[in-house]
Image (spheres, grey):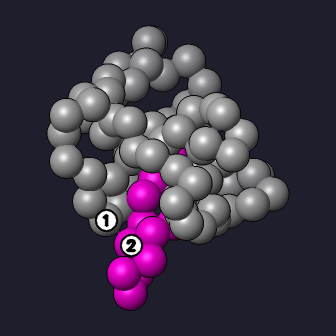
Amino acid sequence: MEPEFYAGDLIFVDPSKQHDNYSFVIALLEDENEATFKQLLIEDGKKYLKALNPDWPNKFTAINGNCRIIGTVVGKWKKY
């Protein structure tokens, strides 16, 4: 079962934690000069960012030198 993230959840990010396949990460998209929260997927040596919002128009973004992972999610806190 994959974790679910909702508006209002707080995520805890460790910039020094190693990221790997299926990690939830904060990525800096250098072309757009903005950070984004996505899931990292690695297939056949290629890296992609997967949108967590099922309604997001672009489900996958290829990482082709235009992105830098700046932190890996290590936990979340949900307000009740």
**Residue sticking out furthest to the left:** 17
- Residue 75 visible in the shown view: no
**Amino acid, disc 1:** Asn
- Looking at the image, residue 29 lies above or below residue 55: above
Q: Specify which label sits upstream in the sequence, 2 or 1.
A: 1
Q: How many marks?
A: 2
Residue in view at x 68 percent, y 54 percent = 54
Considering the whole magenta stretch, tell me its main secondary structure: strand
On residue 6, the disc is none
Which of these two is toward me, 16 or 10?
Answer: 16
- Looking at the image, residue 47 lies above or below residue 79: below
Residue in view at x 64 percent, y 32 percent = 34
Q: Considering the numbered disc 2 on the image, is that residue within a helix, a strand or a loop?
A: strand
- Horizontal side of 6 relative to 42 (left or right) equals right
**Residue sticking out furthest to the top:** 80
Residue in view at x 57 percent, y 33 percent = 35
- Horizontal side of 16 relative to 21 (left or right) equals left
On residue 42, the disc is 2
Q: Mark 1 — residue?
A: 21
